[in-house]
Amino acid sequence: MTRKRLVIAPLVVIVALAACAKQSPTLSPEATRAAQATEFVKRVGELQNAAIQAEATGGLTASQTRPIVSFCVAAARTAKDYPAGWEKTVNTAYREMKAALPVEVLKNPTAAFALAVVEGMLITLNGGVQ
C-alpha cells in the first residue's frame, strides 16, 4: 500500500501544481492570482482533513494535529483575505509549522502526502519553500 502511494503521490503533486500554476489567457493577472489563492485554499483544506483523519484513526495525537490545523485555518484565511499577496506570509508560516512538527507526523503517510501537495504549491507559486 505504501509503495502504491509513493507512485501515485508525485502524479497528484504534478497535477495540483499544474492546476495552480497555469494561467488562463482569459483571466486578468488579478483574477489569476485570486484563482490560485482559491486553489491553494482547497489544498490546505485537504491537509487539514488529512490531519484530522490521521488523528481519528490513531496515526497522530491531538497535540501533533493541532499545529497543522492551526496553520491550515490561518493560511486559508490569509489567502482569502489577501489574494494578491498571501504567498510569502503563508510560506513563512508553513516553514515554521513544518519545522516544529515531530518526526512521527512527517512519517505518517497521509499527513506527509498532504504536506507534500501544499509544499509543492508553495514552491510553484512562491519560488520555493526556503
Image (tube, rainbow, N blue to C red):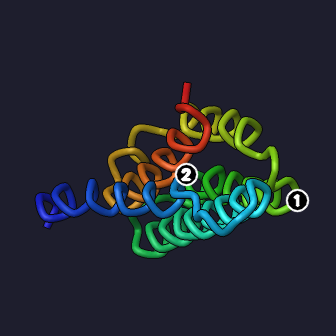
Q: Secondary structure at mark 2?
A: helix
Q: Secondary structure at mark 1?
A: helix
Quarter holding residue 65: bottom right
Q: Which residue is mark 1?
A: 81
Estimate the x, y position of residue 6 in percent, counting from the top left. Answer: 19, 55
The residue that appears at 75% across and 60% down in the rendered structure is 28
The residue that appears at 37% across and 62% down in the rendered structure is 15
Q: Which residue is mark 2?
A: 64
Q: Report how far apart the C-alphas of labels 2 and 1 lie in the structure.
A: 27 Å
Type of amino acid at the residue the image marks with label 2: Gln
Count residues near mark 2 (Cα–Cα under 10 Å), then give few for <14, some for 14-19, many for 20+: some
Viewer-side residue, 129 vs 71: 129
Type of amino acid at the residue the image marks with label 1: Asp
Query: Vertically, is 73 above or below 87?
Result: below
Query: Vertically, is 56 above or below 15?
Result: below
The residue that appears at 62% across and 41% down in the rendered structure is 94
Query: Is 69 placed left or right of 53 in the picture?
Result: right
Q: Foreground mark, 2 or 1?
A: 1
Query: Is 107 placed left or right of 45 in the picture?
Result: left
